[in-house]
């Protein structure tokens, strides 16, 4: 009997009438599925099995050195919640951005998605990544659950006020966590082809964080912690992937799926459906 797995990457909620507490949080929503695809074909915006093969099935081995950078970023943000020195840096950074330009830009609401969407777009264009549709979607779904859960728990427990005073869900930055989660995902999928794919993803992720600072939605400590959580979530997802695939998905080969962005008048989101 076919099973259907739905990963809803509702990475950030955008309100048309202004940003509130839900804008930078990560929400889990399951939209109605109105499309099924043939079970023998993997489809992502026209992508099929012939261009979605796996170029490297070797799993990512655990490496403690991979924990250093995300741990430092997360540690900086956590310590910054109590350190007067780091709080002073937060305020000075805010004032520096305000002095140079007070215009607000919403590009960060969209750029946060770009890195991980690029993985599916590149495969759709015939540039094969490390995993096929099924495997990379399992990885992405796992990374999102880890990232989203961590971000939401911290937001609800720390209740840090945003620089613009709009809400008390500043720490950590969900937009930045989403962007860096996707950047690491892009890097892992394409590092064996060219490291520059990953570099491009990280540039976009860093830009997302800078725009969050510029728009006075986050402190520097929020950005640092969000980046660390995003990177670490993806790394853990790759380490867990062999176990999750074997225990839950039974290593079935026939898969199909579709990526469906949506907008309901108030919110933007992205639904990923996997059928196997």
Image: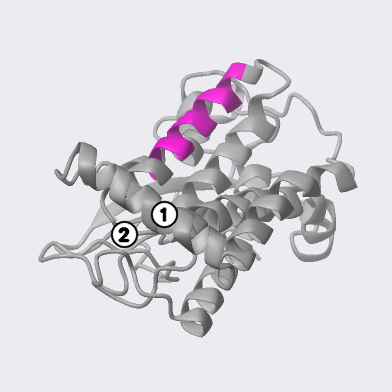
* Image quarter in which the N terminus is found: bottom right
Residue 184 locus on image (x, y percent): 62, 39
Residue at left offset 21%, top offset 65%: 19
State the SS at label 2: loop
Q: Are marks 1 and 2 in contact (CB under 8 Å)?
A: yes
Going from N to C along the chain, the mark reached first, 1 or 2, is 1
Main SS of the magenta part reads helix
- Magenta segment includes 60: no
Q: Is residue 43 visible?
A: no
The crowd level at tag 1 (other Cα within 10 Å; few <14, some 14-19, many 20+) is many
- Camera-near label (1 vs 2) is 2
- Which residue is disc 1 drawn over? 175
* First to last magenta residue range: 196-208
Left or right? Give the position of 180 relative to 14. Answer: right
Q: What is the residue that sits farthest to the left in this orientation?
A: 17
Badge 1 element: helix
Q: Residue at x 45, y 46 (%)?
A: 258
* Viewer-closest of 207 and 88: 88
Quarter assignment of residue 42: top right
Quarter of the image for the C terminus: give it: bottom right
Query: Callout 2 environment at 10 Å: few (<14), some (14 to 19), or many (20+)?
Result: many
Q: Is 166 or 99 nearer to us in this picture?
A: 99
Numbered badge on residue 217 = 2
Q: Does residue 25 appear anywhere in the picture?
A: yes
Q: Is residue 36 above or below residue 51?
A: below
């Amino acid at each position: 009997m076919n099973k259907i797995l739905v990963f809803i990457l509702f990475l950030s909620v955008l309100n048309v009438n202004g940003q509130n507490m839900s804008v930078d949080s990560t929400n889990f929503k399951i939209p109605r599925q109105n499309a099924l695809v043939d079970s023998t074909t993997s489809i992502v915006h026209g992508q099929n099995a012939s261009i979605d093969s796996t170029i490297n099935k070797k799993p990512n081995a655990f490496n403690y050195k991979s924990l250093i950078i995300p741990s430092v970023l997360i540690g900086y943000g956590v310590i910054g919640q109590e350190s007067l020195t780091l709080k002073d840096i937060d305020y000075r950074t805010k004032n520096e951005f305000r002095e140079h330009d007070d215009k607000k830009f919403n590009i960060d609401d969209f750029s946060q998605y770009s890195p991980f969407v690029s993985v599916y777009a590149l495969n759709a264009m015939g540039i094969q990544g490390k995993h096929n549709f099924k495997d990379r979607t399992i990885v992405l779904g796992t990374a999102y659950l880890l990232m989203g859960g961590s971000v939401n728990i911290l937001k609800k427990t720390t209740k840090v006020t945003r620089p613009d005073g709009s809400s008390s869900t500043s720490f950590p930055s969900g937009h930045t966590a989403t962007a860096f989660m996707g950047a690491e995902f892009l890097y892992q999928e394409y590092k064996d082809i060219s490291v520059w794919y990953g570099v491009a993803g990280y540039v976009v992720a860093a830009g997302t964080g800078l725009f969050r600072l510029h728009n006075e939605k986050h402190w520097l400590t929020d950005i640092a912690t969000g980046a660390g959580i995003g990177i670490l979530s993806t790394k853990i997802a790759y380490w867990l992937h062999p176990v999750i695939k074997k225990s839950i998905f039974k290593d079935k080969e026939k898969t199909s799926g579709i990526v469906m962005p949506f907008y309901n008048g108030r919110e933007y989101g992205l639904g990923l459906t996997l059928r196997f």
